[in-house]
Structure formats: structure tokens, C-alpha cells
């Protein structure tokens, strides 16, 4: 699933359905993957995204490429979790597509907010692990 963060990136207009419809659709898709995508596993990725977002707020613009490199570490971490059968291919695709779409600290902030919305729906869609 390829999440569209922006309706118009140039004007800074968010996709109006990103935190509702899009987050719910991803939640529903991942909740169906029984035996994988346990909340505790997904929470590890969410916590890392929050740390990176916080670091981005305190990082000078010229250091953004270093933080972006750390962000790209989420991709092999997700691949490793897939190899251990802890997450599904759909979750890895979500991380891969999202990380590849993050070009600015603002993109990272939107991604962090999206992940928060997704985790809220996921608690509802998969109440027990």
C-alpha cells in the first residue's frame, strides 16, 4: 500500500484522508495477517519513527541527510522482521514506500502522525495479540 502524504506537496496541502481512511485501510489489511504484525512488533517501528521525528526537530538542515540515512535503516529492519516471520510483506511494503517518500523533515512529521493514526485503528482492529 502506497500512502500519499500530500494532496499538493508544493502548497503544503495534506491528503485529507490520510489520518482517517488511509490509516484505517492499512490497519484492516495488516490486522488480517494472523500470526504476524503483532502490536508489540509494530510498536517498535512506531517508537523508532517517533525518535527520528524528534531528532529531526533538533537537527540543523545541513545534517538532514544523516538523519535521512538513519530513517532508511527502517527498511532492512523491516526486512529482517519479515525474515523472522514477525511482520507481513504488506508491512514491509508500507515501510519501504513511506521511507522512500520522505524527502523533508515535514514529510517525516506527516509520516509519524500517520503511523500514530494507524496504531490507533490497529488497537481496534486487532485488540489481542
Image (cartoon, grey):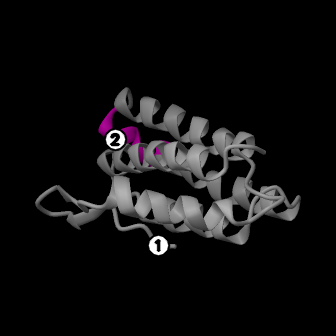
Please tell me which residue is depicted at 53% across the width and 41% down the height of the picture. Answer: 49
Q: Quadrant of residue 95?
A: bottom right
- Percent position (x, y) of residue 91? 64, 63
Please tell me which residue is depicted at 11% across the width and 60% down the height of the picture. Answer: 11
Residue 76 visible to an observer of this rendering: yes
Front residue of 41 and 31: 31
Which stretch appears magenta? 60-67
State yes or no: residue 63 in magenta: yes
- Left or right: 43, with 65 as reference point: right
Q: Secondary structure at mark 1?
A: loop
Q: How many labels, in total?
A: 2
Majority SS type along the magenta span: helix
Residue to which mark 2 is pinned: 62
Circle 1 Cα neighbour tier, 10 Å, few/some/many (<14 / 14–19 / ≥20): few
* Disc sitting over residue 2 in the figure: 1
Circle 2 Cα neighbour tier, 10 Å, few/some/many (<14 / 14–19 / ≥20): few
Q: Quadrant of the C terminus?
A: top right
Amino acid at each position: 500500500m502506497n500512502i500519499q502524504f500530500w494532496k499538493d506537496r508544493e502548497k503544503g496541502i495534506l491528503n485529507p484522508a490520510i489520518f482517517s481512511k488511509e490509516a484505517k485501510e492499512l490497519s484492516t489489511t495488516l490486522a488480517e495477517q494472523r500470526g504476524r504484525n503483532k502490536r508489540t512488533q509494530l510498536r517498535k517501528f512506531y517508537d523508532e519513527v517517533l525518535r527520528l521525528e524528534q531528532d529531526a526537530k533538533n537537527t540543523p538542515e545541513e545534517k538532514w541527510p544523516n538523519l535521512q540515512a538513519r530513517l532508511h535503516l527502517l527498511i532492512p529492519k523491516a526486512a529482517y522482521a519479515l525474515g523472522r516471520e514477525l511482520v507481513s510483506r504488506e508491512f514491509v511494503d508500507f515501510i519501504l514506500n513511506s521511507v522512500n517518500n520522505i524527502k523533508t523533515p515535514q514529510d517525516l512529521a506527516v509520516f509519524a502522525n500517520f503511523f500514530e493514526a494507524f496504531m490507533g485503528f490497529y488497537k481496534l482492529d486487532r485488540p489481542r495479540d
